[in-house]
Image (cartoon, rainbow, N blue to C red):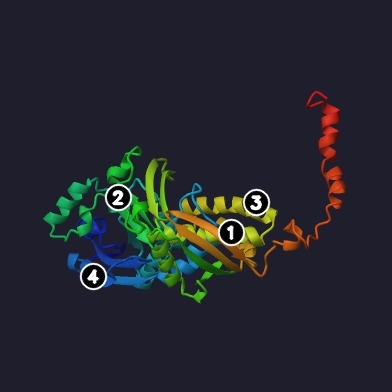
Amino acid sequence: MSERTILAYSGGLDTSVAVKWIKDKYDLDIIAVSIDIGNVANLEAIRKKALDIGAIKSIVIDAKDTFIKSFIYPSLQADALYQGKYPLHTPLGRPLIAQLLVDVARKEGVNIISHGCTGKGNDQVRLDVSIAALAPDFTIVAPAREWNMTREETIDYARQHNIPIPVTVNSPYSIDENLWGRAIECGALEDPWKEPPRDAFTWTREIDDTPNQAIYIDIGFDKGIPISLNNEILSGISLIQRINSLAGDHGIGRIDHIEDRLVGIKSRELYEAPAAVVLLNAHKALEEMVLTKDQLSFKAKVADEYANLVYNALWFTGFKQDLDAYIQSTQRYVTGTIKVRLHKGNLQIVGRKSPYSLYNYSLATYDKGDKFDQTASTGFIHIWGLPVKTQSQAQSLFNN
Ligand code: ARG
């Protein structure tokens, strides 16, 4: 009997070819593991396909709830956006996939994990580093880093070995999607001067196809977690799916940027992430109302650190645990409701309320009911300006 490996199996071309390639080159029997973190059309068909191609066992795991609870929501609470733009849906999924692969491997008594990542991307780093953290004793096999086949050659290999070729092979793009977003790479997009073709997008409508009428949605948060839409309490999955569809219909959530990969390459990345964009904006708007100036400015720095560590494959680290502790502490009063207007690709925050709001009408108003003592400002300004005045006089900064 051959040794066995766990293969992260998506049902796509590369991982299907990998089943045969690993068996032939490494003489390993394959246990395929397919993980659903959203937008997997037919998990059962993928499970069967792995067996048809030659896996000795095929396991499917629905991990959507864990993905939301332990990966998407902590990152939402952190306000994490890589380079200020990318809601990180792919990098958030990888550590979870790694964790589940390791769990299955331990259960099966296997210590070799295989995946279909290429040697040019971030995903190989995320999987390998996460596996190394959770199972330092494991070996990793990554055939796509070794086989040196172009896409055409991979398709030829599949034909020669009677491996069914997925219809998605006809798509000019490389797609990675889950509940939190969709990444579109390759094809025409590799020319950064070219406007993305319309067919690159499937979750978001073109502006000329969006409704003329705006819609308003109310999002309720409890300690930084979105719990309701228009006053209806929803599960994480329903809430995210509904906002994906509502905001996508209004053309919201398209992101087109030049991204700095961990492996040193700049790449043109397109994303569709309607729910992520809406929820990140709404969450931030609520924080603006319940956190102080100091809390907000320090938290923005933490958000940037957090986004970098998620992107850069450092999920399973002490640093991440430390930041989590800080972020959780900041969310104690992030409870309330945000009203968002969606129209023609634009998202506007138009209303906010919270039982913990620091906005105080009687301090802010210029109308009757003003409780702010304006006469106190004179003394405040005198002391606030004292060091400015002292320096200006002592050092003639402005030639006075
Ligand atoms: N550039 C993005 C990232 O590194 C998206 C990667 C998408 N992955 C893929 N296998 N197509 O997170």
State how far apart marks 1 and 2 are (Cα).
31 Å
Tell me the mark number nearer the camera, choosing from 4 and 1: 1
Answer with mark 4 or mark 1, whichever residue precedes in sequence. 4
Answer with mark 2 or mark 4, whichever residue precedes in sequence. 4
Answer with mark 1 or mark 2, whichever residue precedes in sequence. 2
Residue pointed to by mark 1: 285
76 and 23: which is toward the camera: 76
User: Hey, what amino acid is under mark 4?
Assistant: Ala
User: Hey, what amino acid is under mark 1?
Assistant: Ala
Q: Is residue 40 above or below residue 284?
A: below
Residue pointed to by mark 3: 297
User: Can residue 32 be seen at all in this image of the molecule?
Assistant: yes
State how far apart marks 1 and 3 are (Cα).
14 Å
Q: Is residue 82 above or below residue 2?
A: above
Instruction: Quadrant for the N terminus, please.
Output: bottom left
State how far apart marks 3 and 4 are (Cα).
48 Å
Residue pointed to by mark 2: 198
State how far apart marks 2 and 3 are (Cα).
38 Å
